[in-house]
Amino acid sequence: MKIALFGGSGFVGTYLRKEWERAGLQPLVYQRDNHEAPYFWDAETGRLDYQDLEGVDLLVNLAGEPVGSGWWSEDKKKEILKSRVDATSFIATTIASLKNPPALWVNASAIGYYGDRGAEILDESSSMGSGFLAKVVEEWEKAAEPAKGKTRIVFSRFGHVLGPEGGALKKMLFPFRLGFGGKIGSGQQWWSWITLTDIKGAIEHVYLKREMKGQVNFVSPEPVMAKTFTDTLAKVLDRPHLVPMPTWAIKIVLGEMGRELLLASERVIPKKLLDSGYKFKDVQLEEAFTRMLETHE
């Protein structure tokens, strides 16, 4: 199986690369920060060795400016949008030019598309919400248009990705282990989550299910309220969690980023994955935390 991986140095990409290499696969890892890398690419200058993508079975694109680090200044927001749209557009036009394009292109996306919707249950047929991330996802997915008809495209709409080496969980572990964790905001907002294990499993599943295309929610079938999330993490760590992070503090300290990433309520289910027969490895949050943190100790 020939795999091409863009954005392979990030949290999710590093995990996928290591797991596929452990399985005996050698993914082509495209890098933008190393001009001497075997597979260097640059969307701005149009540099990419196209011939290496001929006949690829699976292309995964995770490239984009991290949304969970740094204040969302206007410049930061422009970079978040530009980095995703430019990378996706460049890959799309490249695919369109190939004689033997990839059989499947999995392009990262996000459940931020649905916006803050309270307790409403959301699936792939749900309408677009409001907010900055919703607009980003709309433009991000639209950028893949040039490749439609040339390859099968799946937009993997990620929820909160859980792993002790990165993402939101890594940031929470230090204060929670010290006993300084607590409820985030009202705690009543819904958080949709997925483990790295299930991201890999879902990608491999959609590769085999050739009828699957378009938007696919990459989230556990059991979203939880934020209070349940923090209570469960404290329970697994066996630590008190009596230091809440109130809504007003999140808005002041983190601004728009905090409102959209921590306070927004997105109760999303993976209807397409479930309907197509995917069996999640991590469904219950407590079991997922226990497994991840035991192997991380």
Image: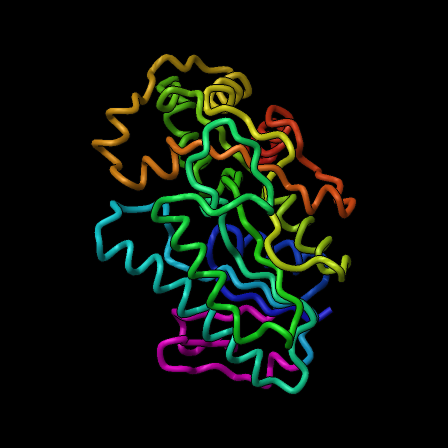
Residue at the image point whose x is 60% and y is 69% from the top: 4
Residue placed most toward the observer, 245 or 1: 245
Residue placed most toward the observer, 243 or 218: 218
Residue placed most toward the observer, 191 or 211: 211
As drawn, 1 above or below 286: below
The image quarter in which residue 241 lies: top left
Spot occupied by residue 244 in the image (x, y as percentages of width and height): 34, 18
Q: Would you say 297 lies left or right of 55 here?
A: left
Q: Main secondary structure of the magenta part?
A: loop
Residue at the image point whose x is 28% and y is 40% from the top: 256
As drawn, 92 above or below 124: below
Spot occupied by residue 246 in the image (x, y as percentages of width and height): 30, 21
Residue placed most toward the observer, 35 or 89: 89
Spot occupied by residue 118 in the image (x, y as percentages of width and height): 46, 28
Residue at the image point whose x is 32% and y is 46% from the top: 69
Magenta span: 28-54
As drawn, 216 above or below 181: below
Spot occupied by residue 208 in the image (x, y as percentages of width and height): 77, 59
